[in-house]
Image (spheres, grey):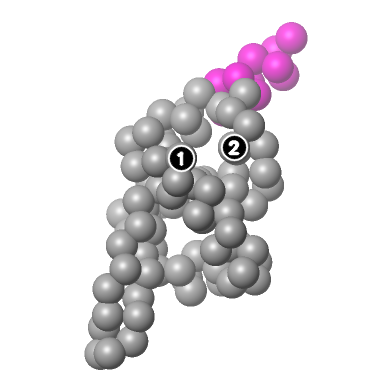
Amino acid sequence: MDELLLSKVRLGIVAELLNYNWIAFTELARALAVSNGNLGAHLAKLVDAGYVEEEKTFVNRRPLSRYRLSKRGRDAFSRHVSELQSLLKA
């Protein structure tokens, strides 16, 4: 199994990102019901691993951070789910 996806929050991030092309940090925090600090720490690990892509811009002079799942992240999630399913069959 993918150790990076064993965290409930990181697994939730990846699962949520499957539904979006891009999602803003604030929307993701709201959807997962986690604090900004907690989400930021977990997102940093996923970005560092190449599972999530990050885009930082300004809109009307306000910072906007958006995230999306990379191909590598999709593949990792798919493998992780397959491994969990094989455990259930065993």
Residue 85 position within the rendered picture, expressed as x and y whole percent measured from the top left = 63, 21
Quadrant the N terminus occupies: top right
Disc number for residue 4: 2
Residue extending farthest front = 48
Magenta residues span: 81-90
Q: Which residue is farthest bottom?
A: 60
* The C terminus, quarter of image: top right
Vertical comparison of 47 with 67: above or below: above
Task: Name the quadrant containing residue 34.
Answer: bottom right
Callout 1, which amino acid?
A: Ala
Residue 45 lies, in percent from the top left, at 53, 48
Q: Nearer the viewer, residue 21 or 89?
A: 21
* Residues marked 2 and 1 touching at CB (< 8 Å): yes
User: Above or below — where is 73 with respect to 86?
Assistant: below
Residue lying at 64% horizontally and 64% vertically, measured from the top left: 38
Which x, y percent locates residue 9?
64, 52
Q: Is residue 19 left or right of residue 80?
A: left
Residue occupying the point 41% across, 29% down: 75
Q: Secondary structure at mark 1?
A: loop
Residue type beneath disc 2: Leu
Q: Residue at x 34, y 42 (%)?
A: 70
What residue does disc 1 label? 49
Q: CA distance from mark 2 to mark 1?
A: 9 Å
The main secondary structure of the magenta stretch is helix
